[in-house]
Amino acid sequence: MSKEKVDVLVIGAGPSGVVSSAYLHNQGIKVKVVERQIFPRFVIGESLIPRCMDHFREVGLFDVLDQQGYQKKFGARFLKHGKVCEFDFSKKFTEGSSWTWQLPRAHMDNVLVEEIQRKGVDVSFETTVTNVEFNGTNSVTTVVDKEGNESQIEAKFVIDSSGYGRVLPRLLDLEQASDLDPRSSLFVHVEDINRPEGQEGWMITFDVLEQHVWFWVIPFSNGKTSLGFVASPEYFEKGGTKEEIFDELLKNSPYFYDRFKDAPKEFDPVLINAFSVGIKQLWGEGYALTGNSTEFLDPVFSSGVTFATESGLLAAKLAARQIKGENVDWQTEYTDYIMQGVETFKTYVKTWYTGELQDIFFVREENKEIKKQICSVLAGYVWDTNNQFVRNHKRAVSSLAKFIRSTYEDSNTAV
Ligand SMILES: Cc1cc2nc3c(=O)[nH]c(=O)nc-3n(C[C@H](O)[C@H](O)[C@H](O)COP(=O)(O)OP(=O)(O)OC[C@H]3O[C@@H](n4cnc5c(N)ncnc54)[C@H](O)[C@@H]3O)c2cc1C
């Protein structure tokens, strides 16, 4: 069996893995990426938030993305039964990027992986990790190529960026059920044949159909648009094909029905059941988990890619320091930091579905200062503890919702 030796092995070439490996390569660390699929490959997660732009810039991957002509995203619009709430990322509390992109992920992920290869990162496609044995911080990983040939990779550190592949969570028994209620999603790409001119045409929108049911509209610059419903798993248990269920659900969005009712679908709608996942720990001796191989919450605030790049970059920085002989306190410097962001977003996800956050979004009279702070959270700046909607996220959201409910009882009762 052939064997090779690297400093760091990265499992998975999604945004988390490419940001990790780009950073390590820039530091002169010998890194190898193994990816079980061949790119471009489909993956959902097409609306980015501004915080991830900082990560792409830091590792030298911003320019190549900027050259692609992706649809720029300057904020987000939420609709609920005729009410509108718009966030403008240029009006946020925390310094940082005020825009990002909405884009087809197969394209973006392929651009990123080609760029790291061009820079010299060793990437093996159609190479699946089947086992990892740890001996202290050193490890031997077994991979299988498309012909079924096994080989081994010795590494001083493993970064598991395998997304829903969740390689180390499965091998090391780290899986944990999410503490969020199970939710599913049915989505598709369409040819946006009735796209209106101007902002109405390209604006990303989340249409709240019922308190627990929402619909995303993410227009791309290539004339296609991503459409998806999110609800409890039972909501999708209707008779018929996925296409029939999708077409039926579309009728629940009067705002978008006419625009999309005849839009040709690019593929059969895809159903992902119970997408939220949890994890027992984020690191162990010789490894760190990043992106979707850690915890995935919910698509509602488009935080997935940003958590993937935030955790991928931080894990790479800490692994680089460890390889250079420094002591790293992984619990404080990695888990506590990442979980501060996860817990903040979790409050927003939970209160979205209880209706509290929807009451805040759709309140009749907005408070501009509060809106700026919530806008920072939605832009992904969930580590700025100067923001009370980050520092005291639970209390700030629930007190504000209570205040709104008591002040505007007539117009803001949850659906
Ligand atoms: C319905 C839905 C909608 C979403 N919408 C958004 C959104 O709008 N915005 C957003 O930011 N996020 C969104 N997300 C989340 C987003 O999809 C993920 O958070 C993001 O893709 C995670 O990136 P990653 O790099 O961790 O994993 P991935 O992008 O999934 O990459 C992991 C890679 O690892 C590879 N791999 C897996 N197993 C192995 C193995 N054994 N060996 C080798 N390689 C392996 C896979 O082939 C894959 O290429 C959404 C998620 C869902 C479920």
Image: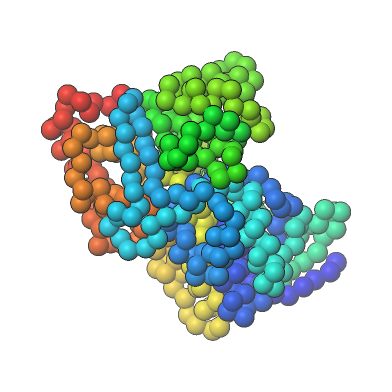
Who is closer to the viewer here, 287 or 145? 145
- The x and y percentages for residue 123 are 72, 64
Name the residue rendered at 55%, 65% in the picture.
63
Residue placed furthest toward the front? 197
Give the vertical position of 349 relative to 140 (above or below). above
Give the vertical position of 9 relative to 374 (above or below). below
Name the residue rendered at 59%, 56% in the picture.
68
* Quarter where residue 241 is shown: top right
Report if residue 246 is visible in the image: yes
Name the residue rendered at 20%, 25% in the picture.
411
- The x and y percentages for residue 387 are 25, 58
Residue placed furthest toward the top? 239
Who is closer to the viewer here, 186 or 85? 85
Specify whether 190 is left or right of 215: right
* Quarter where residue 222 is shown: top right
- The x and y percentages for residue 232 are 47, 29
Specify whether 394 is left or right of 205: left
Report if residue 138 is visible in the image: no
Specify whether 40 is left or right of 397: right
- The x and y percentages for residue 360 are 25, 38
Residue placed furthest toward the left? 407
* Quarter where residue 32 is shown: bottom right
